[in-house]
Amino acid sequence: MENQLISVIVPVYNVEEYLKQCLDSILEQTFSNYEVILVNDGSTDSSGLICQEYAEKDTRIRYFEKENGGLSDARNYGIEQAQGEYLTFVDSDDFLDASHLTILYDALVNNDADISIANYANYQTSTATFYLHTFGEYYEKTYTSEELIDDLSFLERNDLSFSTIWGSLYKKSVFSFLRFPKGVIGEDVALIYKMYTQVDKIVYVHKDTYIYRENDSGISKSKIYPLVTAQLNHVAERLALLAIMGYDVTKHFDRYRTFLEITEYNMRMVWGMEDTETYRHIKENLQLISSNKS
């Protein structure tokens, strides 16, 4: 039986330094029946020229240009252009092991799953060092939607595998009405659990075939604050939405409370953000939780 088409969606924005390595790793895949959707999201460097160069070399690459709208907008655009039965996402500064698509596809098809999730390795740019997340023998583990939602707050503590869009393969039908939220920070966290609620089976693959690049630029307070604020909103929305949908949210409530406690400490003792509205909001919620009589 011939493998069905996979659409590899790659949002591109000012990544001229890393883009060729990303695209080369896709073209070196052992799985061959795929198309690459390159979405140039208004790059101002030579990224667009690099994309065009690769599109001219390989007919599986389809190149699109659009005005800058952010990562979510570029991914959503790619979904609309995709012709494959399956979708996967690769950030344009990351790269793949040659077996990545094969492993994801085989795991998904052999387990009759809707989503397959591979693990990943961190690549530290400054030292050219890989940090692995998987040890021991290869294995696959399947989850029903309910099982994964119930375990999600625990699984997220180990690494990013279950809370990021990249590194996984999806039946296109998963995106029948779901899209990445535009104009928010942490769009993966805001969407991924919603996807898990809409499928029957998910399979996890214990092998790090996606390479996530980490650069060493420090995170300033001006960047931490909006990130923390967005994360607070995402965690609260998930707790509320899952409860409304009828899921047992006991573990998610524990995660929410722990998130508040850890963030309150960091904002007070590490980041010096006691004078912010988000800090006041966190303190207020912690007080309400601790005074709850039920």
Image (cartoon, rainbow, N blue to C red):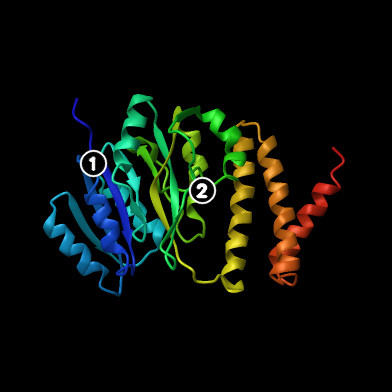
- Up the image or down, 190 lies above or below 13; here it is above
Which residue is at 49% across, 69% downward?
Answer: 216
Q: Secondary structure at mark 2?
A: loop
130 on left or right of 37? right
Q: Dot 2 surroundings within 10 Å: few (below 14), some, or many (20 or more)? A: some
Which amino acid type corresponds to the residue marked 1 in the rendered image?
Answer: Thr
Q: Nearer the viewer, mark 2 or mark 1?
A: 1
Q: Examine the rendering and report whether any part of residue 281 can be seen.
A: no
Quadrant where the C terminus is found in the figure:
top right
Q: Position of residue 188 (x, y in %)?
A: 48, 51
49 on left or right of 280? left
Which residue is at 69% across, 64% downward?
Answer: 278
Query: Mark 2 sits on what residue?
Result: 160
Cβ atoms at labels 2 and 1 below 8 Å apart? no
How many dots with numbers? 2
Quadrant assignment, res 208: top left
Q: Position of residue 119 (x, y in %)?
A: 44, 43
Query: Mark 1 sits on what residue?
Result: 30
Which amino acid type corresponds to the residue marked 2 in the rendered image?
Answer: Leu
Q: Secondary structure at mark 1?
A: loop
Which residue is at 40% across, 35% downward?
Answer: 116
244 on left or right of 69? right
Is 53 or 233 nearer to us in this picture?
Answer: 53
Q: Position of residue 240 (x, y in %)?
A: 64, 42
Q: Examine the rendering and report whether any part of residue 116 can be seen.
A: yes
Q: Dot 1 surroundings within 10 Å: few (below 14), some, or many (20 or more)? A: some
- In space, the residues marked 2 and 1 are separated at their CA atoms by 25 Å
Q: Position of residue 9 (x, y in %)?
A: 30, 51
Give me the disc on residue 272: none
Which residue is at 16% across, 64% downward?
Answer: 53
Mark 2 or 1 closer to N-term?
Answer: 1
- Up the image or down, 21 lies above or below 291; here it is below
